[in-house]
Image (cartoon, grey):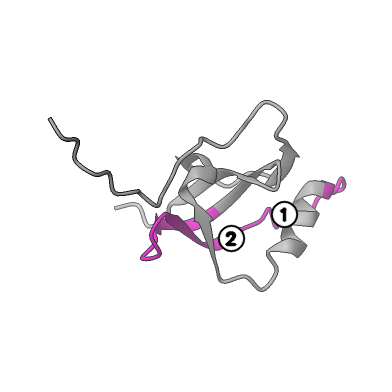
Amino acid sequence: MDNTAEIYKVTFLNQGKVYEVFVKQVYQSDLYGFIEVEDYVFNERSQVVVDPSEERLKSEFNGVRRSFIPMQAIIRIDEVDKSGVSKITNGDNVAPFPISLVGGRSEPKDT
């Protein structure tokens, strides 16, 4: 039996940027329309070259136990063998899928 914990790569939109983070826990939230991610994994290996976008993510998520990400912001969730470098890239070619989570009640038409 494999005792290694699953690692998920979560790609999502945040303020016009594409975030790619690695986490140990991903699940549908009790808050309607949100995905919860927990236990962020950052590349802890000592590196000669420091990636500034990963450093920015480390400081942005420092002290965060859990994040609630709107479903429409999620681009992709992958289960991966090992974590990689978290990064932030421009979201020039990506737009959030238009979705209404609050449904209006339509009145029946008279026939």
Q: Residues within 10 Å of mark 1 (few under 14, many from 20)?
A: few
Determine the residue positioned at 19% across, 40% down. 108
Q: CA distance from mark 2 to mark 1?
A: 15 Å
Kindly indicate the quadrant of the structure image that contains residue 55. bottom right
Looking at the image, residue 32 lies above or below residue 13: below
Residue 34 appears in the figure? yes
Q: Amino acid at mark 1?
A: Arg
Looking at the image, residue 31 lies above or below residue 20: below
Looking at the image, residue 34 lies above or below residue 83: below
| Residue 105 falls within the magenta-colored stretch | no
Residue nearest the observer in this picture, 12 or 109: 109
The picture places residue 92, in percent across and down from the top left corner, at 72, 29
Q: Amino acid at mark 2?
A: Tyr
Residue nearest the observer in this picture, 44 or 54: 54
Q: Relative to residue 43, is residue 71 drawn left or right? A: left
Q: Are marks 2 and 1 in contact (CB under 8 Å)?
A: no
Mark number, residue 45: 1
Q: Secondary structure at mark 1?
A: loop
Q: Relative to residue 31, is residue 23 drawn left or right? A: right
Q: Relative to residue 37, is residue 101 drawn left or right? A: left
Residue nearest the observer in this picture, 32 or 23: 32
2 or 1: tag closer to the N-terminus: 2
| Residue 28 falls within the magenta-colored stretch | yes
Residue 5 appears in the figure? no
Determine the residue positioned at 87% across, 45% down. 49
Mark number, residue 40: 2
Mark number, residue 14: none
The picture places residue 3, in percent across and down from the top left corner, at 37, 57
- Point out the image quarter for the C terminus: top left
The picture places residue 46, in percent across and down from the top left corner, at 78, 55
**Which residues make up the magenta segment?**
23-52
